[in-house]
Image (cartoon, helix red, strand yellow):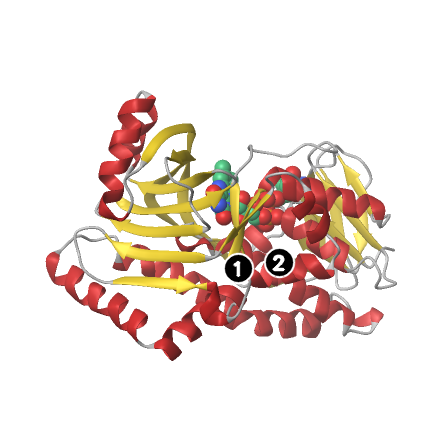
Amino acid sequence: MPDICVIGTGPVGATLALALADSGLEVVALDARAQGAILRGDRSLALSHGARLIFDRLGVWTPLAAMPGAVTPITRIDVSQAGGFGTVALDANDVSLPALGYVVSYIALQGALDAALERRRVDVRYGVPVDRVDATPSHARVVPTSGADALAARLAVAADGAGAGLAGIERVRRDYGQVAVIGKVETSTPHGGLAYERFTPDGPIALLPEGGHYAFVWTLAPRRAQELLAMPEDAFVDRFAAGFGRRRSDFVRAWGRRSFPLALEFARPAVARRIVAIGNASQTLHPVAGQGFNVGLRDAWELKRAISASPREAIGTRPMLDAYAARRRPDRWAGIAFTHGLVHLFGTDLPFVRWPRGLGLALLDAIPPLKRTFTRAMLFGA
Ligand SMILES: Cc1cc2nc3c(=O)[nH]c(=O)nc-3n(C[C@H](O)[C@H](O)[C@H](O)COP(=O)(O)OP(=O)(O)OC[C@H]3O[C@@H](n4cnc5c(N)ncnc54)[C@H](O)[C@@H]3O)c2cc1C
């Protein structure tokens, strides 16, 4: 019987499977997608410096960084609110790092991880969608949709992005009533590694330096988003510049606009008998502040540590899973509370909220130890 069955080899499941490659344990990974394919298109992921360290240790970072245009360092981040005072300037020099984070193409990252899984001869079975996991006291029974034979393992790891449907884990959902419009914009002057998080009355706009342009994520009410998606390019560029306001106005071109709905979803708790959910399957966060993917990667890394520290026969037992869940709780809840709090704090445009909000930003910027602590929490988690 395999020790671990990883369900889903997206970036988070693949990270776990790779991290376990030298553990001496028998690991099988199943993915619904065909080999070399990805689901739901490319996107620009904001990786923290901590995430880069994980990929470094797995031998994935060097080949990824060697792919032309796959990785763009973020050296500074400018946080501000439109129509109000108060800005925060985060700089990699302040925390003595080469970069605060990196913008990485999902397709490039997935390609580098898939290649590493193949190189390390991890047993990955593509084209195997999993229907459900049945738990018994001694093992998890992973049942494919196709009617193929079920697979038994000491522990099933749900890293399928969508979550608990597989696992019977309760999943809480809070719809934000907003959508994210994502796409690319070109500016007439180079970005120089500078990213922006700009809170506007319509919703937050993140600008992430990517190759020679910016990737953007703009959170909006669904009707506004539909209007923006339907606009011709020139009108959109003008509307984008007006929405972004004074911090930057040299937008010249935009392409690749599309949208996806936003909700906070989390498994409560992320473990059940013989199963654990990690990555987006454990928590799907609002994209503001780019935390979701990084929290998910830390799930994979900490689960690898918990598995490696367990005697083989204890893998997947309730005490082992509860200890893992307890260790992840502060970081997970900090990620959920931070992004959810930002959405609500900056989701209102009332003047009596704008003022204390500006004061908060100004204080964070003016008190170096506070700013360093905040920056470190963004880079490495709580
Ligand atoms: C449209 C879209 C745009 C996004 N844009 C951004 C962005 O701009 N910036 C950002 O930081 N984040 C963005 N995100 C979020 C980001 O993609 C996630 O944080 C990240 O992909 C989570 O990784 P994961 O490995 O947990 O899940 P996923 O990347 O979703 O991977 C899940 C894997 O599980 C497999 N799978 C699914 N179901 C099954 C099943 N039943 N059986 C077997 N295998 C299965 C899939 O094939 C896939 O390989 C976006 C998400 C979406 C959907």
- Is 218 placed left or right of 15 in the picture? left
Ligand 1's quadrant: top right
The structure residue drawn at horizontal position 55% and vertical position 35%, both measured from the top left corner, is 42
Front in this rendered view, residue 269 or 249 = 249
The CB of the residue at mark 1 lies under 8 Å from ligand 1: no
The structure residue drawn at horizontal position 51% and vertical position 68%, both measured from the top left corner, is 381
Label 2 secondary element: helix
Front in this rendered view, residue 136 or 40 = 40
The structure residue drawn at horizontal position 43% and vertical position 75%, both measured from the top left corner, is 373
Give residue 47's position: percent from left, percent from top: 54, 54
Discs 2, 1 touching: Cβ within 8 Å: yes
- Is 56 placed left or right of 213 in the picture? right
Indicate which label's residue lies in the foreground, 2 or 1: 1
Task: Give the residue type that dot 1 points to.
Answer: Ala
Q: Mark on residue 373?
A: none
The CB of the residue at mark 2 lies under 8 Å from ligand 1: no
Q: Is residue 8 visible?
A: no
Which is more N-terminal, label 1 or label 2?
A: 2
Give residue 367's position: percent from left, percent from top: 32, 77
Q: Which residue is most to the left?
A: 351
Task: Give the residue type that dot 2 points to.
Answer: Arg
Q: Mark on residue 99?
A: 1
Q: CA distance from mark 2 to mark 1?
A: 10 Å
Q: In this figure, which residue is indicated by the disc labeled 2?
A: 52
The structure residue drawn at horizontal position 35% and vertical position 52%, both measured from the top left corner, is 197
